[in-house]
Amino acid sequence: MLTMMDLADWHEWWKHFGSTELRHILLLWWDPIGVYGVVEAIDEYDDYSGQLARMLREGVRAAEIAEFLGRIRCDWMGLSPIARADAFAAERIVEWFDRAMSRAG
């Protein structure tokens, strides 16, 4: 879903809502290293959220998001691939973003 929100408004939305919401989605639905619920690790996946935000803003869909999550899991974290988990998380991310952009106008 492409949004009609201009870039400045999108950046404000991201700063105030989007980044925090995506943080929680990654912890709840993806969490390849199992840190959900560890207070000290709440920002564990923040390094990836900016790239995800750009991809979502550009209209990238779940398959490409899943591929990106898989590269993070395998190439950056050195973990075994779990394509179904990455695809499931990617679908949740895209659904969340589409709903958020609909609400934001």
Image (cartoon, rainbow, N blue to C red):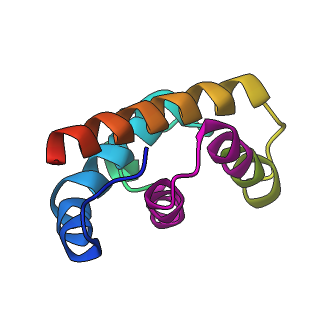
Name the residue rendered at 48%, 65% in the picture.
54
Q: Position of residue 15 (x, y in %)?
A: 21, 66
- Residue 31 makes an appearance in the image: yes
Residue most extreme to the front: 4
Q: Position of residue 95 (x, y in %)?
A: 42, 31
Q: Where is 18 relative to 66, above or below?
A: below
The magenta segment is 45-68
Disc count in the image? 0
Name the residue rendered at 58%, 51% in the picture.
60
72 is within the stretch colored magenta = no
Q: Position of residue 18 (x, y in %)?
A: 27, 53
Q: Main secondary structure of the magenta part?
A: helix
Lateral position of residue 65 relative to residue 11, left or right: right
47 is within the stretch colored magenta = yes
- Residue 38 makes an appearance in the image: no
Lateral position of residue 49 relative to residue 4, left or right: right
Q: Pick whichever, 17 or 82, lies toward us.
A: 17
Q: Where is 2 relative to 86, above or below?
A: below
